[in-house]
Amino acid sequence: MAKVCHSCGKGPSFGNSRSHSMVATKRRFNPNLQKVRVLIDKAPHRVYVCTRCLKAGKVTKAV
C-alpha cells in the first residue's frame, strides 16, 4: 500500500524517536489516509486520500 495521498501527494515524513536518555532512533510519521470512492473522469475509483483533503472538499466522493 502506497502511503501517499491521491489528491495532494502527501507522504510519510521521517524523524527521530527520543528515549529517556535522548538516544535517537529513526521513526516514520504516516499521514492519516482513508480509502474512499472518488470520481475521476466521471468514473468511481477507490483511492487513498488524506483527511485534510477530505475535510477541505478537494475530492468529489462517489455516492
Image (cartoon, rainbow, N blue to C red):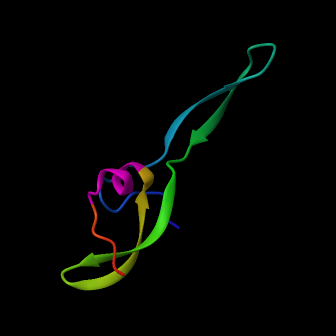
Residue in the image at 34% along x and 63% along y: 6
**Residue 7 drawn above or below residue 46:** above
**Residue 4 drawn above or below residue 42:** above
Residue in the image at 27% along x and 77% along y: 39
**In front of the other: 21 or 62:** 62
**Quadrant housing residue 54:** bottom left
Residue 44 rendering spot, x and y as whole percentages: 32, 84
Residue 48 rendering spot, x and y as whole percentages: 43, 66
Residue 38 forms part of the magenta stretch: no
**Residue 61 drawn above or below residue 23:** below
Residue 24 rendering spot, x and y as whole percentages: 69, 23
Q: Residue furthest bottom?
A: 43
Residue in the image at 54% along x and 47% along y: 30
Question: In this picture, which residue range is highlighted in magenta?
Answer: 52-58
Please give left or right for residue 42 compared with residue 37 in the image: left
**In front of the other: 48 or 17:** 48
Please give left or right for residue 43 compared with residue 12 in the image: left
Residue 13 rendering spot, x and y as whole percentages: 48, 39
Residue in the image at 48% along x and 46% along y: 12
Q: Residue furthest top?
A: 21
Quarter the C terminus occupies? bottom left
Decide whether the magenta segment is chiefly helix, strand or loop: helix
